[in-house]
Amino acid sequence: MDNTADGPLDLAALLPRLAQLGALASRSHLVERVMERAGITLDRPAVTVLVTVENAGHPLRVGEIAKRMQVVGPHVTRVLHDLERLDLARRVPDPDDRRAQLIELTPAGADTARRYIDTVFAWLTEALADWPDTDRQTLSRLLTRFLDDLATHLAATE
């Protein structure tokens, strides 16, 4: 077990908290509650695709969307058919490879993604309203570092 400036890492205390976080998000139907608050009537996978492309800041290939969502490509393709039908996303030529296509959001799709993201931000701001700025910054820094390191470690073990 690695030691830190504050003492050894207590995995016995950390693991139940991580499980609690996952259960809290699932049991509270957090995503569904945010979608309802944002006035979004899509299903969770559709919103996840929209948010994934919006957060990228540029069109993405289906495979890249799937990788970022940690699902298989055919799953994203099925979701994209619905998003295209609803005029929330469209396929555009990849300027670097004319054989490939990218997925970009339509203005309505980008608006839907932004409403979802803004609602999540508002919810988190409310939940952390009593936290000092330094605590919020520390949470952000450490959570980012933890997830990046965990993702790197998991990728190396695959």
Image (tube, grey):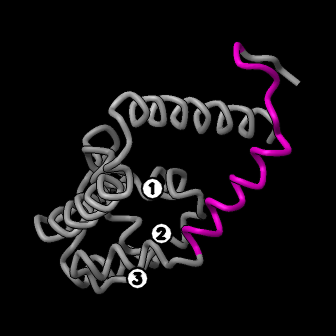
Query: Farthest left residue?
Result: 107
Callout 2–callout 1 Cβ contact below 8 Å? yes
- Disc 3 crowd rating (10 Å Cα; few below 14, some 14-19, many 20+) is few
Q: Secondary structure at mark 1?
A: helix
The magenta span reads 5-26
Marking on residue 76: 2
Give me the residue at 34% from left, 42% from top. Answer: 97
Q: Secondary structure at mark 2?
A: helix
Marking on residue 128: none
What residue is disc 1 on? 65
Q: Amino acid at mark 1?
A: Ile
Look at the magenta stretch and give its main secondary structure: helix
| Residue 56 coordinates in the image, percent (x, y) | 32, 45
What residue is disc 3 on? 43
Q: CA distance from mark 3 to mark 2?
A: 13 Å
- Disc 2 crowd rating (10 Å Cα; few below 14, some 14-19, many 20+) is many
| Residue 72 coordinates in the image, percent (x, y) | 60, 64
Q: Amino acid at mark 3?
A: Asp
